[in-house]
Image (cartoon, rainbow, N blue to C red):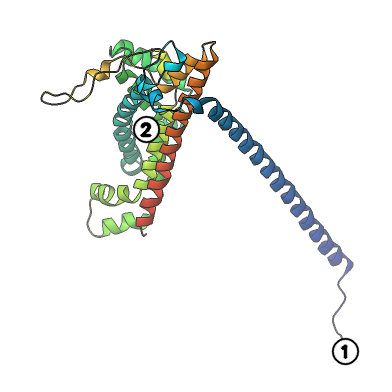
Amino acid sequence: MNTEKPSPPSARLDAAAIAELIRTGKRKELVFAILGVFCLAIAILTLTAAFLSLLLDGWSRIRPEFFVNFPSRRAAEAGILSAWVGSFMVLIVTMVAAVPLGVGAAIYLEEYGQKGGWIKDVIEINVTNLAGVPSIIYGLLALGLFVYYFKFGQSVLSAGLTLALLILPIVIVATREALRSVPVHIREAAYGVGATRWQMVSQHLVPYSAGGILTGIIIGLARAIGETAPVITIGALTFIAFLPPSPISTEPPFLNFDWLFSPFTVLPIQMFNWVSRPDSSFHASAAGAGLVLLAMCLAMNALAIYIRYQVRKKIKW
């Protein structure tokens, strides 16, 4: 004999309302997924079209002579020798200035700074906000500080220090996030065997977070190599037909630092110079320089991904 009582009408209504609510949620989720895929497709197609246009315009200029010739008033003979050498030298100064300072500041803020102290809070807020400051502001700051106050002039050193200031917040934030990703039991185990704080940081914390730190550094340098506004502000040359002095000398101590105070140009400035000319042949040269710059940025980002993968593969928590 069936002793089950029939469900009351209110329970059946509630079940139907819940089922309808679930169906409505699934429809909305499907619409949102389709909309997301549509937006992603538009973004990918736009980037692909822009890249193909750049490739078609500039591929004819990608040949060995393009890399070893100086800029010229004749489009067929124009090259990017001074531009890519200048970019490389500026990037060296940027790396030497920004990496030790940024990583050291991040380690101090994360491991040594007083927790809850107002000084640390002010520094953290300013570092986070500086990451979103327009690059032209850094150029104006560097013009007054490095060019006129310290009298470095419109040189490779001024440009490198300017870009170092630009990417410093990026390096600090990326390094701090990499340090935070290390499990707390690593720190506790190091302290448990008698390690000092410096030994814990240098022998355990930094090696375990090296992948994230290097990724942040390389991404910051990839941004710096494509910046135009700061180096224009401090006086980068738009046309330069000579190279800075070599950093290697034939006489002891075999190092030459005159190149730090040499006039310079970089790839974005050279592209700006060619694009501003009415001759379409120079536009093709600008597209070729853009391909080189894009390849350098993609290579640096690929290197960051590879380093992060290799470091994480070797680490076993």
Q: Considering only vertical position in the picture, is 282 above or below 126? A: above
Q: Position of residue 264 (x, y in %)?
A: 34, 16
Please tell me which residue lies in front, 139 or 187.
Answer: 139
SS label for mark 2: helix
Mark 1 packing: few (<14 Cα in 10 Å), some, or many (20+)?
A: few
Whether residue 47 is visible: yes
Say left or right for 41 vs 170.
Answer: right
Q: Considering only vertical position in the picture, is 312 above or below 160? A: below
Please tell me which residue lies in front, 233 or 271.
Answer: 271
Residue displayed at 89% across by 67% down: 9
Quarter of the rendering containing residue 154: top left
Quarter of the rendering containing residue 54: top right
Pick out the residue farthest to the bottom.
1
Residue displayed at 12% across by 26% down: 253
SS label for mark 1: loop
Please tell me which residue lies in front, 281 or 40.
Answer: 281
Q: Earlier in the sequence, mark 1 or mark 2?
A: 1
Say left or right for 112 vs 43.
Answer: left
What amino acid is labelled 1 in the image? Met
* Nearer the camera: disc 1 or disc 2: 1
Marks 1 and 2, how far apart at CA: 78 Å
Q: Quadrant of the N terminus?
A: bottom right
Mark 2 packing: few (<14 Cα in 10 Å), some, or many (20+)?
A: few
Q: Considering only vertical position in the picture, is 120 above or below 202? A: above
Residue behind mark 2: 119
Q: Quadrant of the C terminus?
A: bottom left
Q: Considering only vertical position in the picture, is 162 above or below 238? A: below
Residue behind mark 1: 1
What amino acid is labelled 2 in the image? Ile
Q: Position of residue 75 (x, y in %)?
A: 46, 15
